[in-house]
Image (spheres, rainbow, N blue to C red):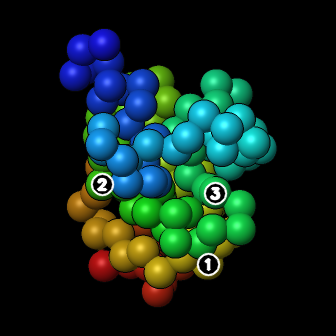
């Protein structure tokens, strides 16, 4: 798999330290509900590990940081689902108004405590 393929297809599959970087083990990934993903219909971009707020926070933070690498056809839905996950899990992640995801959602849709 090329680096570009990894950037697009496995971009947010981060959670657990390992020799190959951060990855969610397959058994954990399979146990996730569709709505735990940034793109539920494709089960792409995991954003939540139920019962583990630290890993959920890391996944969402990484999704925000790496948003610009997502395929263009996924960006609007992914941006909305990132904001929804921040609200749903009451995460403390701060996001700058200049982040590229705000081309797809309103900065005002983010709770004030999460605005930078």
Graded by Cα atoms within 10 Å as few (under 14), some (14 to 19) or many (20 or more), the crowding at tag 1 reads some
Q: Nearer the viewer, residue 9 or 16?
A: 16
Instruction: Give the label on residue 8, or none.
Output: none
Secondary structure at badge 3 equals loop
Q: Is residue 78 visible?
A: no
The residue positioned farthest toward the top in the image shown: 1
Q: Nearer the viewer, residue 2 or 114?
A: 2
Residue behind mark 2: 65
Q: Is residue 6 visible?
A: yes
- In this rendering, position of residue 76 left or right of residue 52: left
- x then y, percent, for residue 90: 61, 78
Q: Tell me: residue 26, above or below residue 9.
A: below
Q: Tell me: residue 45, above or below residue 97.
A: above
Q: Quadrant of the N terminus?
A: top left
Residue at figure coordinates x 32%, y 18% from the top left: 5
Q: Tell me: residue 20, above or below residue 50.
A: above
Earlier-in-chain disc, 3 versus 2:
3
Residue behind mark 1: 90
Secondary structure at badge 2 equals helix
Foreground disc of the pair 3, 1: 3
Residue at figure coordinates x 52%, y 44% from the top left: 24
Q: Tell me: residue 48, above or below residue 107.
A: above
Graded by Cα atoms within 10 Å as few (under 14), some (14 to 19) or many (20 or more), the crowding at tag 3 reads many
Task: Say which quarter of the image contains residue 21.
Answer: top left
- In this rendering, position of residue 73 left or right of residue 19: right
Residue behind mark 3: 49
- x then y, percent, for residue 87: 62, 71
**For the residues marked 3 and 1, what is the alpha-carbon distance in whole angstroms?**
14 Å
Q: Quadrant of the C terminus?
A: bottom left
Earlier-in-chain disc, 1 versus 2:
2
């Amino acid at each position: 798999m090329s680096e570009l393929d990894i950037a697009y297809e496995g971009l947010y599959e981060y959670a657990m330290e390992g020799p190959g970087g951060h990855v969610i083990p397959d058994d954990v990934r399979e146990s996730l509900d569709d709505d735990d993903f940034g793109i539920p219909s494709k089960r792409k971009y995991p954003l939540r590990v139920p019962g583990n707020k630290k890993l959920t926070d890391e996944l969402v933070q990484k999704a925000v940081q790496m948003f610009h690498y997502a395929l263009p056809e996924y960006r609007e839905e992914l941006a909305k689902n990132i904001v929804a996950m921040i609200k749903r899990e009451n995460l403390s992640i701060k996001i700058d108004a200049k982040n590229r995801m705000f081309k797809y959602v309103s900065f005002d849709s983010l709770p004030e405590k999460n605005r930078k």
